[in-house]
Amino acid sequence: MQDDYLDCYGDPAITKIGTDIRECKCTWLFTQAITLASHDQIARLRRHYGTEDDTQVKLVYSELLLPQHYLRTQQQLYESIRGALQSHSSSLPTDTLTRLLDRLLNRQK
């Protein structure tokens, strides 16, 4: 999920950008778009997904508020994992796993 987001919206100075759309990969963003899109938006995705011009695909993603949906989902998953770690704190190295979780959440590439 995070790799898919970074491929589409990450900083091009840090990570590769846009290859998933051009390579027609079945990404988290694409599956969310297909689930949420109108008939017109699905037609636009079909027409442009897997081509060199990713502008229309990103436009549909923006119309569907997928960047915001991703950030909310990421935060919910983070909180769920943190809660699970806390509930098993006696049997897990909670501090180490929490630091790892924080690093993964905040990575840029």
Image (cartoon, rainbow, N blue to C red):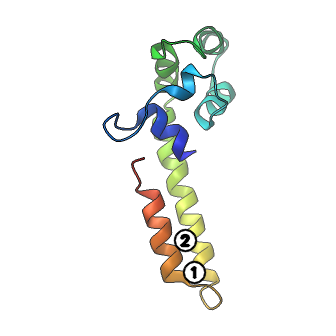
Q: Is residue 80 left or right of residue 59?
A: right
Q: Secondary structure at mark 1?
A: helix
Seen as rendered, the residue at the extreme bottom is 90
Given residues 96 and 13, the one toward you in this image is: 13
Q: Amino acid at mark 2?
A: Arg
Measured in 3D between alpha carbons, the distance from the residue under mark 2 to the one under mark 1, in whole angstroms, is 6 Å
Name the residue located 62 percent from the left edge and 91 percent from the top edge. 90
Q: Secondary structure at mark 2?
A: helix
Name the residue located 52 percent from the left edge and 46 percent from the top edge. 2
User: On the image, numbered disc 2 is attached to which residue?
Assistant: 82
Q: Which mark is residue 40?
A: none
Residue 93, placed above or below residue 10: below
User: On the image, numbered disc 1 is attached to which residue?
Assistant: 86
Residue 61 percent across, percent down from the top left: 51, 25
Q: Amino acid at mark 1?
A: Gln
Circles 2 and 1: CB distance less than 8 Å? yes
Name the residue located 62 percent from the left edge and 8 percent from the top edge. 47
